[in-house]
Amino acid sequence: MAIKESISRRVFVVCNAVVLILLAVMALFPFVNVIASSFATSLELTMRPFMLFPYNPTIQAYRYIFSTNTFINALRNSVFVTVIGTIINLTMTYLMAYPLSHKTLVGRRKLMNLIVFTMLFSGGMVPAYLNLKQLGMIDTYWALWLPGAISTFNLIVMKNFIQQIPDELKEAARIDGANELYILIRVILPLSLPVLATFCLFYAVSLWNSYFDCMLYINTSSKWTVQVLLRQIILTAQGLGDQDAMGHSARAIIPSEAVKNAAVLVATLPILIVYPFLQKYFAKGALLGSVKG
């Protein structure tokens, strides 16, 4: 026999749904405005700073962005930095989390204290720059990959996740003659796919959106990522510089608000495309590893 919901319960469910729908609509407004503004003319943007759809849509902004190979090259650089950087991040984090998950590891507590210490204190920007310069990494992508190869928070969560895997599975593999490398790859790795998928997206989004490190360490404009180029487009649109970020002369039309919105949209699309494929792992991957230490 089905249990009937009380009137107060129904009212709560309806009110809760209405509030969540309103919040979702409010969150979508800025994104829809960016899309609409990217297809609007300069005159319409001047008359209507906020819009949900343009009256006279045009693709002039997108033609401007792709009029040279500059933006395509920046997108290519961003994809390369994100893919290789994410592989490095996941590999380094996973290889460090596995031994730390062993409670019998000698010096495990001291290592964890040193790792947690990095969450509270850091050397700062100037020592980091001097260190990378001394290592010869300035103007190379290694300056974007190695300093942040392991996130302390992600490492701790992944360590806790691996630690919750029953030891009986490892012991059974050892009885069958498996060594630690075999156990790491064939036993632990398949069970860690949810947390790896979660941190894959975390690392990828961080690398894709990062612009300050690239602006600080990369001197050659042909190596810029799309976020740095986007910053240059915005600065150029404000009238800074004799030559715009797309390589046009100062006599060319300075990028309008539509160009900035179009660049933002193009730079955001790759992450929006990847996110739905990994979103289902979020709850399982992040929560299971944060239950206990």
Image: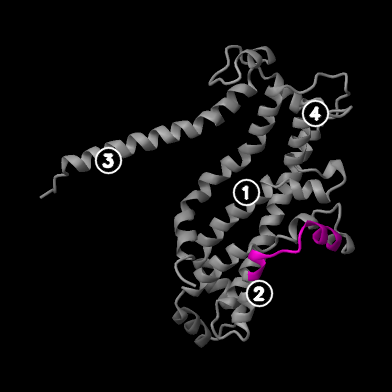
Give the Cα distance between marks 4 and 3.
Answer: 50 Å
Dominant secondary structure of the residues highlighted in magenta in the image? helix
Which residue is label 2 attached to?
114
Task: Name the N-terminal-most of marks 4 and 2.
Answer: 2
Q: Which residue is mark 1?
A: 205
Is 221 left, or right, of 46 in this rendering? right
Q: Considering the numbered disc 1 on the image, is that residue within a helix, a strand or a loop?
A: helix
Residue on which the image places disc 4: 236
Image quarter of residue 32: top right
Q: Disc 1 to disc 2, how far (Cα)? A: 27 Å
Q: To which quarter of the image does residue 137 belong?
A: bottom right
Discs 1/2, front: 2
State the residue at coordinates (75%, 36%). Answer: 231
> In the image, which is nearer the foreground, mark 3 or mark 2?
2
Mark 1 or mark 2, earlier in chain: 2
Which residue is label 3 attached to?
A: 13
Q: Which residues are magenta?
A: 117-131
The question of residue 128 being in magenta is answered with yes
**What is the x, y in percent for residue 250?**
88, 22
